[in-house]
């Protein structure tokens, strides 16, 4: 029970890596705020809540588009109202709008930067003051190996994730003296709805580049995030940790 008594807010936790992280953290004793955007399938979030409640923990769902500053403020405000504190913020929500730069539309660029990068700014800014007051907090941002190595067809996505890495390191320097740590995880190819839509030839090329010769599971990322959120990781700050089967090294 590494997270007993803690409250964790995980953005984009209605499915995928966010949902796996929410459940993993509940297994470790945390109460959870589940978030997903308006107009998404609410039964996904409800299913995650049920699993957490069955584990004997509390779970509360808050709909909010984290790409909007005021929505993120409301999300954090409602979470604080519900549980009185936020110990852990996992900035996980992310989207892709893949296209070669030559064909990329302005909307595709804006949408990805808005959710993946500005969303991290929005939620982190809103949670910072309360975390500073409690002189403790763990912020974990979900980046990607693509933010380090680049990927054709993903200039928007890799720019957003590289931005998240720079953001994390600067934040880690700013807030460490207040008892808050900030780290990033960089998943490689993880089986989820985000990756299942990729063409077979792209998946085969990815697999060939992974020394472990298998794709990652959502739980592989959830385990790392959970560790970074625990007291065992108190002296880890400003790091980017890959979880990619050795794809990038
Ligand atoms: P996913 O299965 O597509 O799930 C994304 C989650 O984010 C969903 O719950 C989605 O809600 C939510 N979301 C999207 N836009 C949002 C917004 N504006 N506000 C709040 N929530 C929003 O993706 P995933 O594979 O689990 O990815 C999770 C994170 O890991 C992302 O940051 C992604 O970039 C990163 N990552 C993934 C991989 C991979 O291989 N899968 C690799 C590297 C990094 P809806 O139900 O509405 O869509």
Image (cartoon, rainbow, N blue to C red):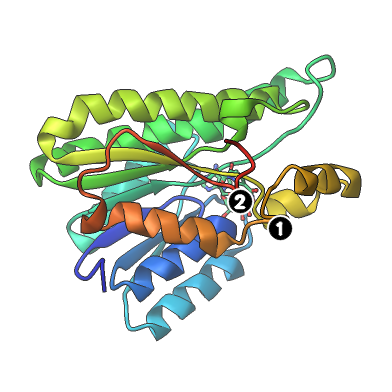
Give yes or no for contact between labels 2 and 1 (Cβ–Cβ under 8 Å): yes
Q: Is residue 186 left or right of residue 60?
A: right
Residue at (71% x, 27% y) in the render: 108
Distance in Å between CA atoms under marks 2 and 1: 8 Å
The reply to whether residue 60 is in sight is yes
Residue at (83% x, 14% y) in the render: 102
Q: Give percent across and percent down for residue 63.
A: 47, 54
- Dot 1: what SS? loop
**Circle number at residue 245:** 2
Q: Foreground: 206 or 10?
A: 206
For label 1, count other residues whose C-alpha is less than 10 Å away and answer few (under 14), some (14-19) or many (20+). some
Q: Give percent across and percent down for residue 47.
A: 54, 75
Q: Is residue 12 left or right of residue 112?
A: left
Classify 116 as above or below 27.
above
Q: Quadrant of the C terminus?
A: top right
Q: Foreground: 78 or 59?
A: 59
Classify 8 as above or below 147.
below
**Circle number at residue 128:** none
The reply to whether residue 13 is in sight is no
For label 2, count other residues whose C-alpha is less than 10 Å away and answer few (under 14), some (14-19) or many (20+). many
- Dot 2: what SS? loop
The answer to which of marks 2 and 1 sits earlier in the sequence is 1
Q: Give percent across and percent down for residue 170.
A: 31, 23
Residue at (29% x, 28% y) in the render: 171
Residue hosting label 1: 214
Classify 100 as above or below 81.
above
The answer to which quarter of the image holds residue 82 is bottom left
Q: Quadrant of the N terminus?
A: bottom left
Is the residue at mark 2 in contact range of ligand 1, meaning its CB lies under 8 Å from it?
no
Residue at (46% x, 29% y) in the render: 164
Q: Is residue 214 left or right of residue 197?
A: left
């Amino acid at each position: 029970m590494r997270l007993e008594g803690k409250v964790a807010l995980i953005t984009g936790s209605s499915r995928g890596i966010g949902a796996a992280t929410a459940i993993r953290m509940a297994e470790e004793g945390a109460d959870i705020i589940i978030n997903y955007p308006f107009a998404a399938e609410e039964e996904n979030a409800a299913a995650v809540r049920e699993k957490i409640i069955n584990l004997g923990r509390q779970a509360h769902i808050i709909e909010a588009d984290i790409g909007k500053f005021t929505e993120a403020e409301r999300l954090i405000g409602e979470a604080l109202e519900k549980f009185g504190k936020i110990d852990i913020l996992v900035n996980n929500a992310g989207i892709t709008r893949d296209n070669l730069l030559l064909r990329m539309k302005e909307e595709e660029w804006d949408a990805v930067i808005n959710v993946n990068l500005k969303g991290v700014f929005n939620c982190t800014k809103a949670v910072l003051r309360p975390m500073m007051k409690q002189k403790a907090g763990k912020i974990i941002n979900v980046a990607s190996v693509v933010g380090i190595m680049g990927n054709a067809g993903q200039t928007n996505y890799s720019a957003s994730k590289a931005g998240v890495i720079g953001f994390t390191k600067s934040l880690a320097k700013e807030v460490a003296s207040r008892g808050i740590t900030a780290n990033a995880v960089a998943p490689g190819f993880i089986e989820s709805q985000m990756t299942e839509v990729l063409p077979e030839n792209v998946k085969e090329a990815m697999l060939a580049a992974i020394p472990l010769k298998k794709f990652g599971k959502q739980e592989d990322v959830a385990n790392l995030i959970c560790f970074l959120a625990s007291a065992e990781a108190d002296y880890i700050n400003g790091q980017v940790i890959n979880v990619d089967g050795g794809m990038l090294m």
